[in-house]
Image (spheres, rainbow, N blue to C red):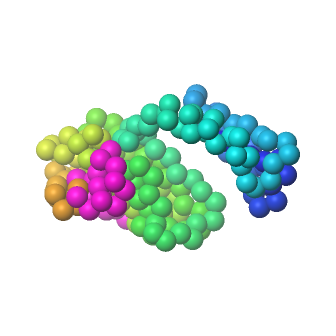
């Protein structure tokens, strides 16, 4: 990440805090640099460096653990982060979810409805799956796969790693 110290649109303190959180969570490849004389726009000379760094990165499209915590939320469409989508939430929703075997265990705060977007990369969809939210089992069964859902999710993002084959929707608090 690059941030201009003289940025008047987004204070540099926001990026400094974000960088600290990413380091705290173990993102080893994350690089944060400040440009002393830059404002909100990146200097053109930085673009090749950023492009080169981006090309060298590899992402896991189906990480076994995800976390979403954001400030004031007023977004349409609802926020999706990897395989979790908040469908209805309060002003400051938070979700932590983890795959354990063929189960999802999640903690949700200020989330009234969420969807777990499932794929074979995440779970064995031919077997029983359980979903536990805030210590309570809210789903147990074999998810119903949908070819239409897989195609629509691929076309939405043009990313086969983000294809969704089944959805389990749950109620939160």
Q: Which residues are magenta?
A: 151-173
Query: Which residue ends up furthest to the left in the rendered image?
Result: 126
In this image, 161 relative to 67: left or right? left
Where is the N terminus found, in terms of image quarters? top right
What percent of the width, then of the height, locates residue 29?
A: 57, 30
Based on the displayed image, in which of its 4 quarters is residue 148 positioned? bottom left
Residue 152 covered by magenta stretch: yes
Q: How many marks?
A: 0
Q: Is residue 24 left or right of residue 128?
A: right
x then y, percent, for residue 101: 28, 35
Looking at the image, which residue sits at the far top?
28
Q: Is residue 121 left or right of residue 6?
A: left
Q: Is residue 154 magenta?
A: yes
Query: Residue drawn at (45%, 69%), measured in percent from left and top?
Result: 77
**Residue under the point 37% across and 65% down:** 171
Please give left or right for residue 51 compared with residue 12 in the image. Answer: left
Q: Nearer the viewer, residue 89 or 29?
A: 29
Q: Residue at x 77, y 61 (%)?
A: 9
Residue 3 rendering spot, x and y as whole percentages: 74, 46
Name the foreground residue: 154 vs 109. 154
Rendered position, 16 above or below 31: below
Q: Is residue 23 visible?
A: yes
| Residue 51 horizontal/vertical position (percent) | 56, 39
Q: Is residue 138 visible?
A: no
């Amino acid at each position: 990440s690059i941030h201009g110290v003289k940025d008047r649109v987004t204070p540099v303190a926001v990026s400094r805090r974000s960088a600290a959180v990413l380091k705290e969570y173990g993102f080893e490849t994350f690089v944060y640099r400040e440009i002393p004389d830059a404002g909100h726009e990146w200097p053109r000379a930085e673009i090749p460096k950023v492009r080169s760094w981006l090309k060298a990165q590899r992402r896991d499209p189906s990480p076994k653990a995800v976390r979403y915590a954001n400030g004031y939320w007023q977004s349409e469409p609802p926020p999706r982060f990897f395989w979790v989508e908040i469908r209805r939430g309060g002003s400051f929703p938070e979700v932590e979810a983890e795959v354990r075997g063929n189960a999802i265990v999640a903690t949700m705060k200020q989330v009234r409805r969420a969807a777990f977007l499932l794929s074979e990369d995440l779970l064995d969809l031919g077997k029983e799956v359980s979903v536990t939210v805030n210590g309570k089992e809210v789903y147990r069964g074999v998810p119903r796969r949908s070819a239409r859902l897989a195609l629509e999710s691929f076309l939405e993002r043009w990313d086969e790693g983000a294809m969704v084959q089944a959805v389990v929707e749950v109620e939160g608090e």
